[in-house]
Structure formats: structure tokens, C-alpha cells
Amino acid sequence: MNLEEQRIEFSQRKFLAVPLAGLLVWFIIGVSGIYLPDGITVWVLFLGTGSIVYLGMLIAKWTGENFISKKGVRNDFDKLFLFSMAQSMIIFAIAIPFFLVDYTSLPLTVGILTCLMWIPFSWIIQH
């Protein structure tokens, strides 16, 4: 398949599981920020954002998405999205030292850094 055919094939998927998982996790983080002490909320934020992909895998079973296919053929846009996810996670190397200086920066920096993978995704699906 050429790239345009791969883009069309990639864009026809549901893509509900990970956004739903992110919505749920960020809701929990927000509630913890209101009701829990800051030290606990920091851990909720780190553990929550780290668990979004795993929660997405679980939700994918109910949405009918093929989250990780061992038998399916991945196209170039699958690879691009996975590299974008890896880039987003690597950038935690910026958020963590900044957090150690000022813990109130954590929600903003982690929110921005984890959303970086969605910019190439939006381009891929031409959203």
C-alpha cells in the first residue's frame, strides 16, 4: 500500500479506548487535586498518566478495538504514532526535574508533554 492508502486505513479505526482512558484518569487526577493532599495527588498524577495506556488496552476490549495485534500488519502510521508516544514519555525527563524545583508545575507540564503524541495523530487522520 502507498502512504495515502495506509493513512485512510489508519484513519478508519475507532480510536476511543485511549481517549476514554485519558478522560477517566484525568478526572481522577482532578478530583484528587481537590480533595487529597498535594503529596498524594503528585503520586496519583504520576501513576495515573503512566496507566492510561494499560487502561486503554482494557477499554479496547469493550470498544472492539484491536489495540495490539500480533497477527495484524502494522502500517507506517502505526509506527509514527508509537514513536510519538515514546517521544511523549521520554520528555518526562523535563517534567520531573521541573517538578522537583516547583511541584505545582506538575499538572501543566505533564498535561502538555503527554498530549504531544496527539499532534501527529491529528495530522495523520487529517482532523
Image (spheres, rainbow, N blue to C red):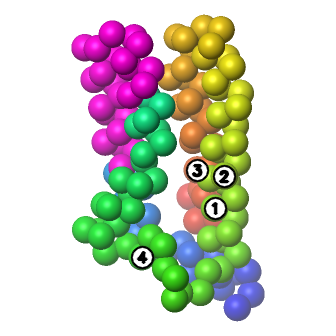
Left or right, 100 with reference to 26: right
For marks 3 and 1, the one nearer the N-term is 1
Image coordinates of residue 26 in percent, x first then y, are 38, 34
Whether tag 1 and tag 2 are in contact, CB under 8 A, the answer is yes
Whether tag 2 and tag 4 are in contact, CB under 8 A, the answer is no
Name the residue: 56% across, 30% down: 110
Residue 30 magenta-highlighted: yes
Left or right, 61 with reference to 111: left
Question: Distance between the Cα atoms at labels 1 and 2?
Answer: 6 Å
Q: Amino acid at mark 2?
A: Ala
Q: Is residue 54 above or below residue 44?
A: below
* Numbered mark located on residue 66 in the image: 4
Q: Nearer the viewer, residue 12 or 54?
A: 54
| Residue pointed to by mark 2 | 86
Q: Nearer the viewer, residue 87 or 127?
A: 87
Q: Amino acid at mark 1?
A: Leu
| Residue pointed to by mark 1 | 82
| Front disc: 2 or 3 | 2
* Numbered mark located on residue 118 in the image: 3
Q: Amino acid at mark 4?
A: Asn
Q: Which picture quadrant has residue 112?
A: top right
For marks 4 and 1, the one nearer the N-term is 4
Helix, strand or loop under label 4:
loop
Residue 16 visible, this angle: no
Left or right, 14 with reference to 10: left
Q: Amino acid at mark 3?
A: Trp
Whether tag 4 and tag 1 are in contact, CB under 8 A, the answer is no
Mark 3 Cα shell of 10 Å, populated few (<14), some (14-19), many (≥20): some
Q: Quadrant of the C terminus?
A: bottom right
Name the residue: 58% across, 65% down: 125
For marks 2 and 3, the one nearer the N-term is 2
Residue range (magenta): 21-44
